[in-house]
Image (cartoon, rainbow, N blue to C red):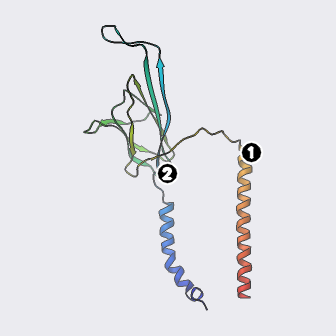
Amino acid sequence: MTFLEMYSKEIISVLSPFGTFLLNRWFKAKAKLQVAPAHQFAFLVQEPLLDNQGRQVQPNQVIYTRSFLIRNAGRETATKLEVVFNWKPMYLNIWPIRKHTQGAEPDNRHVLVFDSLSPGELVRVEVLSLNHNLPALLTVRSAECIAKNIDVNILPVVKKPLLILIWTLIGTGFATCVYLALLLMQRFFSRRLG
């Protein structure tokens, strides 16, 4: 008898708690914040900028806009969500409209605080500035985690019949692989034991 054959039960009984621990840690429901820059643009407005006396300061004006998507991609609610900007934006819009508080850090960083963000929920934060630069988004965090920056792309929508076909082929391929693996294991062990 080999070592594995002799002590297989003991080895499995020692390794199974570690496997259970790793699976619980990997599959545990947790908040997972994501932040993505959805839009950024500078509008050149052909209207002169005037001072208080009516004199022209600039021949045209620039309106800067930037939009961020904040999403909880996890399976647990993110609580005490903070969105921190480098300074207070001139104009701020949050969509969908939700209760939040605004404040400032001692170093004048501007902070938006949301009570919570449910799993799968998305919040859009938009800032706008007239003739001034926009503040940078410094961080998005909650009591559970720090948001991960992600890139977003525009993708075409795939028709439902094509999706059904693709998932059917994937499922068939997976089932075939499992069947072949079981068949090979059966032949391997039948030759060793027989």
Relative image position of residue 45 (x, y in whole percent): 47, 17
The relative height of residue 27 versus residue 40 in the rendered view (above or below) is: below
Q: x and y percent of residue 120 in the render?
A: 51, 46
In the image, which disc is placed on residue 52? none
Residue at image point 74% right, 45% down:
161
Q: Is residue 144 above or below residue 132?
A: below
Q: Which mark is residue 161?
A: 1
Sequence order check: which comes first, mark 1 or mark 2?
2
- The secondary element bearing badge 1 is classed as helix
Q: Percent from the top left, x then y, of residue 70?
A: 46, 41
Q: Secondary structure at mark 2?
A: loop
Amino acid on which the number 2 mark rests in the picture: Gly
Label 1 – label 2 distance at C-alpha: 29 Å
**Residue drawn at (71%, 87%) of the image:** 193
Mark 1–mark 2 CB contact (< 8 Å): no
Question: Which quadrant does the N terminus fall into?
Answer: bottom right
Q: Residues within 10 Å of mark 1 (few under 14, many from 20)?
A: few
Res 94 quadrant in image: top left
Q: Is residue 92 above or below residue 60?
A: below
Which amino acid, mark 1?
Pro
The quarter in which the C terminus is drawn is bottom right
Q: Residue furthest left?
A: 106
Side of 11 relative to 145 (left or right): right
Q: Which residue is tagged 2?
A: 74
In front: 70, or 60?
A: 60
Circle 2 packing at 10 Å, graded few (<14), some (14-19), many (20+), is: some
| 189 displayed left or right of 65 | right
Residue at the image point whose x is 73% and y is 46% from the top:
162
Residue 108 found in image quarter: top left
Position of residue 163 relative to residue 18, above or below, is above
| Residue 173, horizontal then vertical, whole percent | 73, 60
